[in-house]
Amino acid sequence: MSEPDIQLKKFQKELSAGTVSLALLAVLARAGEPLYGYLIAKQLERVGEGVLSGKQSALYPVLRNLEGGGLLESFVEPSVAGPPRRYYRITEAGRLTLQSWIAAWRATRDSVDSVLEGIPA
């Protein structure tokens, strides 16, 4: 792998760290009902255009961290086909945090876009 490819992978990993949390909160806020991991991943694939980059396993530690921070809550229900499923829903604190994260995201995006303006891709 060439040095530019290595640097791109590193950059993508660093960008991914915060954006996955933001995207997860947004998916759960939109859902209006609790979702289990596989359904969350499918929603991200459908609307997120590669936020997870095919790494569904990365979803679960982020969900646990968000729950540990009080932004999500979860419960387990039996499944007719397979093991029990853990469902997640966004808390009120999660909704408030999501709003501030959206504002921070948009401000950062706009600022970076301003700096990048005029540079060929």
Image: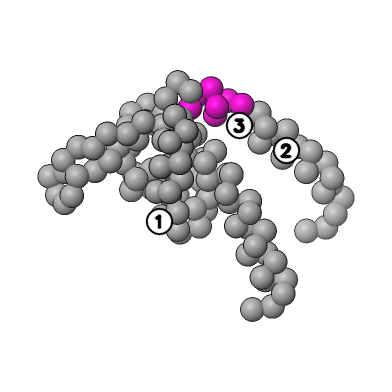
The three-letter code of the residue at mark 1 reads: Ser
Residue 12 in percent (x, y) is at 63, 57
Q: Which residue is mark 1?
A: 57
Residue 80 left/right relative to 110: left
Q: Earlier in the sequence, mark 2 or mark 3?
A: 3
Q: Earlier in the sequence, mark 2 or mark 1?
A: 1
Q: Which residue is mark 3?
A: 101
Among the 4 quarters of the image, the one containing residue 3: bottom right
From this view, report whether residue 4 is shown above or below residue 105. below
The three-letter code of the residue at mark 2 reads: Thr
Residue 113 shows which numbered tag? none
- Residue placed furthest toward the left: 80
Residue 105 in percent (x, y) is at 66, 36
Residue 108 shows which numbered tag? 2
SS label for mark 2: helix
From this view, report whether residue 104 is shown above or below residue 64. above
Residue at 63 percent of width and 64 percent of height: 9
